[in-house]
Image (tube, helix red, strand yellow):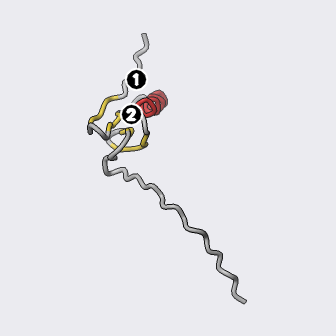
Amino acid sequence: MKKPKIELEEQTPRKVIRADKAPTTGYSLVVDGHFKSHHDTVEAAEEAGMALKNKFPMLQVQVYDAATKTRSMVQWPVPA
């Protein structure tokens, strides 16, 4: 006897972000020249960049602004 096939309802399409193409909206983290995570606000992107920089200070971390197509470095605070 064959088992009945279980059909799933329509699956929602995944939002695929390619690492080799620059995003068209929002802000992204660029780690050592590669696009990594995508954020809606610059504050969220900078916060994620600082967290990454605090954990791994040797990385080069930048925030990419898709609207102006510019990158700004995330500066790790220098101890006083």
Three-letter amino acid code of the residue under disc 1: Trp
Dot 2 corresponds to which residue?
59
Q: Residue at x 37, y 53 (%)?
A: 18
Residue 30, quarter of the rendered image: top left
Rendered position, 80 above or below 38: above
Q: Secondary structure at mark 1?
A: loop
If you read the primary sequence from the N terminus, does the residue marked by circle 1 or circle 2 appear first? 2
Q: Secondary structure at mark 2?
A: loop
**In the visual, does 60 lie left or right of 68?**
right
Q: Are marks 1 and 2 in contact (CB under 8 Å)?
A: no
Q: Work out whether residue 56 can be spotted.
A: no
* Image location (x, y in percent) of residue 44: 46, 32
Q: Which mark is residue 45?
A: none
| Quarter occupied by the C terminus | top left
Q: Residue at x 38, y 40 (%)?
A: 26
Q: Which mark is residue 76?
A: 1
Residue 68, quarter of the rendered image: top left
Residue at far top of view = 80
Rendered position, 10 above or below 18: below
**In the visual, does 15 lie left or right of 60?**
right
Residue 1, quarter of the rendered image: bottom right
Q: Which of 53/2 is in front? A: 2
Disc 2: CA contacts within 10 A as few (<14), some (14-19) or many (>=20): few
Residue at far right of view = 1
Q: Residue at x 40, y 16 (%)?
A: 78
Q: Residue at x 37, y 38 (%)?
A: 27
Disc 1: CA contacts within 10 A as few (<14), some (14-19) or many (>=20): some
* Image location (x, y in percent) of residue 69: 26, 39
The nearer-to-camera label among 1 and 2 is 1
Q: Work out whether residue 64 can be spotted.
A: yes
